[in-house]
Image (cartoon, rainbow, N blue to C red):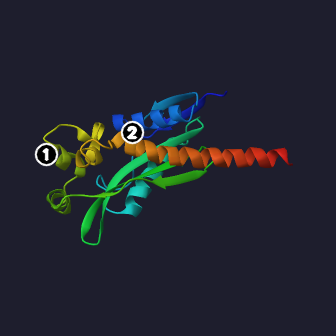
């Protein structure tokens, strides 16, 4: 089995763990590199579109490296029906220019948190204050705090990475199948 060369466009421990866990669950032999890549969007993305764009930009920034693929993960918030929700997006990009995207869990934020974000603050520091902890974005994240640890940030992003890997692998199988029929 060929060892996959993959990169995660972040040095965030929750995101690195998410990608490692998903690759392991797929039973893949891999080398995973992490390198921070700019999202090209606001530090606090404030729409589904902006959050998705950040994930794509991160993945594409590292996909130029000699590897099989790069993954970008981005968390953001958006407003719907008078409530603010936390959201997350992922993108998988290949050096050949192929791209897959997927989104994950979305849950409403308490108004005490949403109000601070509407004032221009960023979710990570607000969640640290709310949870009375430091560095929540590196492990449990907002989703972990708000679900009382039922789903932590790495688990949430791991689900997104599985969606990305599934699409990537399905596409690779289709290419291999088509090549056999030529």
Farthest bottom residue in view: 81
Image location (x, y in percent) of residue 91: 49, 50
| Nearer-the-camera pick, 29 or 63 | 29
Residue appearing at x 60%, y 46% in the figure: 168
Image location (x, y in percent) of residue 29: 58, 27
| Nearer-the-camera pick, 104 or 45 | 104
Residue appearing at x 38%, y 62% in the figure: 48
Q: Please identify the quarter of the rendering in which residue 145 is found.
A: top left
Q: Earlier in the sequence, mark 2 or mark 1?
A: 2
Q: Please identify the quarter of the rendering in which residue 173 is found.
A: top right
Report the disc number at residue 129.
1
Residue 12: tell me if it is visible.
no
Report the disc number at residue 15.
2
Residue appearing at x 15%, y 58% in the figure: 116
Image location (x, y in percent) of residue 158: 44, 42
How far apart marks 2 and 1 lie (CA) works out to 21 Å
13 to the left or right of 171: left
Residue 129: tell me if it is visible.
yes
Report the disc number at residue 9.
none
Give the SS element for disc 1: helix
Give the SS element for disc 2: helix
10 Å neighbourhood of mark 1: few (<14), some, or many (≥20)?
A: few
Quadrant including the N terminus: top right
Residues tagged 2 and 1 counted as in contact (Cβ below 8 A) = no
Image location (x, y in percent) of residue 144: 27, 44
| Nearer-the-camera pick, 25 or 4 | 25
């Amino acid at each position: 089995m060929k060892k996959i060369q993959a990169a995660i466009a972040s040095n965030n421990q929750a995101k690195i763990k998410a990608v490692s866990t998903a690759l392991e669950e797929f039973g893949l032999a891999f080398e995973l590199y992490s390198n921070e890549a700019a999202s090209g969007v606001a530090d606090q993305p404030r729409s589904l579109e902006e959050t998705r764009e950040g994930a794509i930009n991160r993945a594409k920034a590292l996909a130029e490296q000699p590897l099989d693929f790069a993954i970008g993960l981005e968390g953001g918030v958006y407003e719907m029906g008078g409530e603010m929700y936390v959201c997350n997006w992922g993108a998988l990009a290949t050096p050949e220019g192929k791209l897959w995207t997927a989104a994950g869990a979305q849950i409403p934020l308490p108004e005490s948190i949403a109000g601070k974000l509407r004032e221009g603050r960023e979710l990570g520091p607000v969640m640290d204050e709310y949870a009375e902890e430091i560095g929540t974005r590196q492990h449990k994240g907002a989703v972990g705090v708000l679900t009382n640890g039922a789903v932590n940030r790495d688990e949430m992003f791991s689900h997104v990475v599985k969606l990305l890997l599934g699409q990537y692998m399905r596409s690779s199988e289709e290419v291999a199948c088509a090549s056999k029929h030529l």
